[in-house]
Image: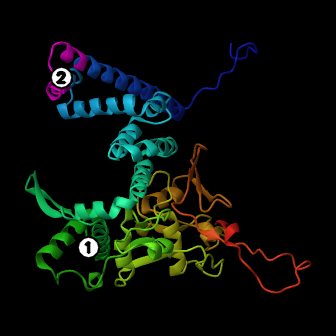
Amino acid sequence: MYDDPTVLDWPVPGPLEVVQDLDGVMAGFAAERLLRVDELRDFHLARAGAAGRVLTDVVLRGLRLELAGALRITEHAAGRLIGLAEAVVNRYPEVWVALREARITERHVEVLVTGVDELEPGVRDELAGEALVLAEGEPVGVFRRKLRTLIDTARVVTLAARQEEALARRRVWVEHEGDGMSWIHVYGPTVEAHAIQTRVTAIAKTILTGEGETRSLDQVRADVVADLLIDGVVSSHPDSSRGIRASVVVTVPAVALLQADDAGVAGAGCDPAVVEGFGPIPIARARELCGGDGQWMRVLTHPETGMVLSVGRDRYTPPASLRRLVRWRADRCMAPGCGVPASRCEIDHTVAWEHGGHTSLKNLAPLCKGHHRVKHHGGWGLRQVPDSGGVVEWTSPAGRRYLVPPERRVPVFRDTTPDKTTHTGTGTGVDANHAAPF
């Protein structure tokens, strides 16, 4: 039968294609469910109005109760489902269409609605389209981070005032978990929170190198926090772990720093200051950090900044300035969807040194320890796309390709001196108008 030339030889989809198809079907069903939930909401409100009941909160509470009972979920989950359905059907219909057509997942929808709904109506309407474009092009984790940056950048004018209000709510509280364990929560400024995390991690990693140490990194980190907060100076820690201080990368556009007014508000069109692994901070806070002590790493971005881009084959280990530049450009691990900050990653030669790879910006990228192992032992292939500004292409063992762009582009300034045969003067010039991403 299969040798009959009149029988079409249809390709058989592989297991991954089947999973993708099913995921698309589920997205379509999720869109249909949201539409029906919103119809159910309209029905309940209309029925209550016909009966002369105007207690909308009570009506919606009854709907939550009924939906929770029918779907066997909590009332809280039912309320979130009703709110999500109302948002995408009535306020973001393009998002609903994208979900129905499986261009995004239901989780993308949840992240988008939660983020964009917090904006002022005018800003919300402007950003909804941009947010949808991001959702269609990024995995959920990357989308959540980029959406947060998009929202904060749009609200950068009010960022300082909003952070001042949030700062007044800083506090510490304990949440009992059971089994003799509790969570201790510290709500405070993001820069300090990242500094605490990086210092605790650095101390813990040093302790883990001790002979006979059997605890995990998370366990040691928890013990370090307790030791430092309870005892202050901890003599039981090894000498090598003492003196470790926090390190946080804060990128500050020089133009914004110079143009900021006395209240710390940058001029229109200026990019905000950004904390690695988080997002924008008020320019006044960045100005304070840039004039502060040496535990903060400052990167002042400017189109004519000189920087080390390569040491070729002269040495395997990149110099400190090049390592900082590689991490700054990527901001995070350069694996698809990974959110580990670059400061906690290893610097990897995309083309291995032993295979002729150079120690240069064009051949270096930060990878977290797990994805570094996947690269070398998981059958994946990596390359940096030429003239892309650091985009890393991952090729899976099945032949699928995934492109991971860096967070930032490093500008390259080309020599604009005319050809020597027609140029009578001397010297070399650079034209910032012809700068291109490196």
Q: Mark 1: which amino acid?
A: Gly
The x, y position of residue 316, in whole percent, is 58, 77
Please report whichever mark, 2 or 1, sits nearer to the chain's N-terminal start.
2
Q: Mark 2: which amino acid?
A: Gly
SS of the residue under disc 2: helix
The x, y position of residue 185, in whole percent, is 17, 60
Q: Quadrant of residue 41?
A: top left
The x, y position of residue 345, in whole percent, is 44, 66
CA gap, disc 2 to disc 1?
A: 54 Å
Residue depicted at x 46% and y 25%: 25
Q: Which residue is mark 1?
A: 212
Q: Is residue 89 above or below residue 8?
A: below
Which residue is more in the foreground, 75 or 25? 75
Q: Which residue is mark 2?
A: 69
Q: Is residue 11 above or below residue 196?
A: above
Q: Is residue 113 above or below residue 234?
A: above
Magenta stretch bounds? 45-64
Q: Quadrant of residue 252?
A: bottom left
Residue depicted at x 41% and y 72%: 249
Task: Check if residue 61 falls in the magenta segment.
Answer: yes
The x, y position of residue 304, in whole percent, is 61, 77
- Residue furthest to the front in view is 262
SS of the residue under disc 1: loop
Residue depicted at x 44% and y 26%: 28
Is 52 placed left or right of 284 in the picture? Answer: left
Colour scheme shown: rainbow
| Quadrant of the rendering where the N terminus is positioned | top right
> Label 2: few (<14), some or many (≥20) within 10 Å?
few
